[in-house]
């Protein structure tokens, strides 16, 4: 087995063991995941990853299972996981929205801030209201400067 394939298998095992729901795409429910959406700490299939790429790194920084990973990236997956995001999305009434809208809502932005605060060990953001949660933002500030030129170790 080549090194890329070994890396992919190792990452699948680690990520699936963290959360049973990581075995299916957080957006469409398809099995056999290929990518992690780091900012939200969730797992997506190749088809949905294509939609996420269009959102940009500030909203959706993706990492393939066959790429090299480090502990920092894994912290996002440990903090998040598909189960946690799906529960959150259902609570804020954004679960059934299309990818382009769902991840541009105030709710999704708030969730990314929660995950990042846990990874970076700082205070969580203030809560948002259900009324504000579904508002789709035109312009989202990129607070993930660390992903702009991210290279694996």
Image (cartoon, helix red, strand yellow):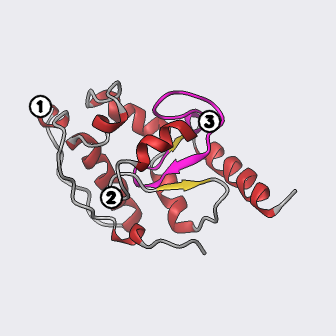
Q: Spot the residue most to the right.
A: 1
Direction from residue 115 to residue 27 in the image, left or right: right
Q: Quarter of the image holding residue 17?
A: top right
Looking at the image, tell me whether mark 1 or mark 2 is earlier in sequence order.
Answer: 2
Q: Residue at x 50, y 60 (%)?
A: 75
For label 2, the residue is 58
Disc 3 versus disc 2: nearer the observer: 2
* Circle 3 crowding by C-alpha within 10 Å: few under 14, some 14–19, many from 20: many
Residue 120 rendering spot, x and y as whole percentages: 37, 67
Q: Are marks 1 and 3 in contact (CB under 8 Å)?
A: no
Q: Is residue 45 visible?
A: no
Q: CA distance from mark 1 to mark 3?
A: 32 Å
Of 116 and 49, nearer the camera is: 49
Q: CA distance from mark 3 to mark 2?
A: 25 Å
Direction from residue 135 to residue 123 in the image, left or right: right
Magenta stretch? 20-42
């Amino acid at each position: 087995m080549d090194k890329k394939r070994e890396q992919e298998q190792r990452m699948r095992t680690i990520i699936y063991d963290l959360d049973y729901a990581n075995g299916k795409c957080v957006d469409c429910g398809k099995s056999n995941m290929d990518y992690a959406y780091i900012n939200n700490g969730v797992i997506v299939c190749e088809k949905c990853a294509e939609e996420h790429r269009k959102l940009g790194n500030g909203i959706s920084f993706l990492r393939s299972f066959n790429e090299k990973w480090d502990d920092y990236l894994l912290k996002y997956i440990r903090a998040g996981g598909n189960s946690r995001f799906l529960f959150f999305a259902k609570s804020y009434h954004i679960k059934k929205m299309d990818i382009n809208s769902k991840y541009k809502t105030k709710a999704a932005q708030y969730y990314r801030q929660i995950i990042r605060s846990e990874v970076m060990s700082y205070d969580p953001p203030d809560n948002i209201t259900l009324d504000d949660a579904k508002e789709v933002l035109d312009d989202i500030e990129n607070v993930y400067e660390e992903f702009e030129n991210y290279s694996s170790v």
